[in-house]
Amino acid sequence: MGGLVTVMRSGHQARDLGLFVANLRAQAGLSLTTLASLVGSSKSTLSRLEQGQIPLPARGKNRPLLVALVHLLCSAASERDCILCTIS
């Protein structure tokens, strides 16, 4: 889990976070369309997030989306708590 915190704190937060979300989504076997529906977002917004095109995704209007993604995609409570603390 230490590697995850390093990714979340890196200078390339948007890109690294996007890759992290894309990997979690793939592991869960979810399409962009399905995940967007589950978290109340659009497919294009999630795609932009995964591609690192949303600067500082843990801030501003995209923070609720990121929190919803963490809750949906992270199965272990300890991992979820660690990520949520890191993006706070």
Image: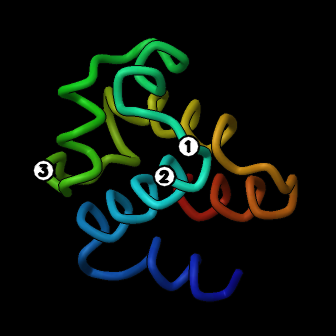
Element at label 1? loop
Element at label 3? loop
Of badges 3 and 2, the one in the foreground is 2
For marks 3 and 2 on the same chain, the one whose residue lies earlier in the sequence: 2
Around disc 1, counting alpha carbons within 10 Å, would you say few (fewer than 14), some (14 to 19), or many (20 or more)? few
Around disc 3, counting alpha carbons within 10 Å, would you say few (fewer than 14), some (14 to 19), or many (20 or more)? some
Of badges 1 and 3, the one in the foreground is 1
For marks 1 and 3 on the same chain, the one whose residue lies earlier in the sequence: 1
Q: Amino acid at mark 3?
A: Gln
Where is 54 relative to 18, above or below? above
Which residue is depicted at the point 26% across and 24% down? Answer: 43
Spot occupied by residue 72 in the image (x, y as percentages of width and height): 66, 35
Q: CA distance from mark 1 to mark 2?
A: 5 Å
Disc 1 target residue: 29
Q: CA distance from mark 3 to mark 2?
A: 19 Å
Disc 3 target residue: 53
Left-right relation of 74 to 50 = right
